[in-house]
Image (cartoon, rainbow, N blue to C red):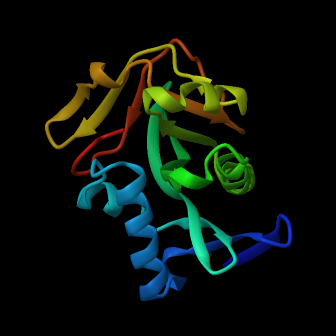
């Protein structure tokens, strides 16, 4: 799967599955995320961003933005929901404030609306307003994770999880449970 849209003569976004990333692009994307998160983007965070689609923003031959969308299962209201989960959203520091993040998210939101029951993500404090302005809704209820030992509350994630409803009927004051994975659960 590959979708390319040209935003101007200089800015191009490619949407491509992890399987179609060559080594050079994988290396560039990981380096961009390491730099953008100032060393707070580990191997498990990178692992979470793999296996789905990547929106890659190029200025000429330079990768200046990245965002990924992977499938996860969320439990809510007695139902299992197919979620497009956003991971690894970053724009190079010297290119921020130019609409690049919005362009990347626009591509992922297009995929979410076409393929999933809802979108979901866990936001940093710095990005809360960005996602809210795009129509993502802060989850008002409790969060939890389905772990090998059962459902466990993830209170530290309350208030930082956002959803983009598509077809799922959601009670935003209910409990939202994510599937298990190593590292950060949300």
Residue in front for this viewpoint, 74 or 158: 158
Which residue is the extreme one toward the right?
A: 8
Residue furthest to the left in view is: 149
Picture residue at 39% right of the left edge, 67% below the top: 30
Report the front residue among 17 and 25: 25
Q: Position of residue 120 (x, y in %)?
A: 54, 39
Q: Residue 162: in sight, yes or no?
A: yes
Q: Residue 35 at what x, y percent from top left?
A: 38, 57
Left or right: 125 as drawn, with respect to 20: left
In the rendered image, residue 54, in percent from the top left (x then y), is placed at: 56, 66
Q: Is residue 48 visible?
A: no
Instruction: Determine the residue located farthest toward the front in the rendered image.
Output: 94
Question: Residue 171 or 35: which is nearer the viewer?
Answer: 35
Asked whether, in this view, residue 14 is left or right of residue 70, the answer is: right
Q: Position of residue 57 (x, y in %)?
A: 65, 66
Residue 138 horizontal side relative to residue 30, left or right = right
Residue at (66% x, 78% y) in the render: 1
Q: In terms of image quadrants, where is residue 24?
A: bottom left
Q: Residue at x 63, y 81 (%)?
A: 61
Rendered position, 42 above or below 117: below
Work out which quarter of the rendered image holds the C terminus and state it. top left
Q: Residue at x 50, y 56 (%)?
A: 71
Question: How many numbered marks does the figure carry?
Answer: 0
Q: Is residue 75 above or below residue 154?
A: below
């Amino acid at each position: 799967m590959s979708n390319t849209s040209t935003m101007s003569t200089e800015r191009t976004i490619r949407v491509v599955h992890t399987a179609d990333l060559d080594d050079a692009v994988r290396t560039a994307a990981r380096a961009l995320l390491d730099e953008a998160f100032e060393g707070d983007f580990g191997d498990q965070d990178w692992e979470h961003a793999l296996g789905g689609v990547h929106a890659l923003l190029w200025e000429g031959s330079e990768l200046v933005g990245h965002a990924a969308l992977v499938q996860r299962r969320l439990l809510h209201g007695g139902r299992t929901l197919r979620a497009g989960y956003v991971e690894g959203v970053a724009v190079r520091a010297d290119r921020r404030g130019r609409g690049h993040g919005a362009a990347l998210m626009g591509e992922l939101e297009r995929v979410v609306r076409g393929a999933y029951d809802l979108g979901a993500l866990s936001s940093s404090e710095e990005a809360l307003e960005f996602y809210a302005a795009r129509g993502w809704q802060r989850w008002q209820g409790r969060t939890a994770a389905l772990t090998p030992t059962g459902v466990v509350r993830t209170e530290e994630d309350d208030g930082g999880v956002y959803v983009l409803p598509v077809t799922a009927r959601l009670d935003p004051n209910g409990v939202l449970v994510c599937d298990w994975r190593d590292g950060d659960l949300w």
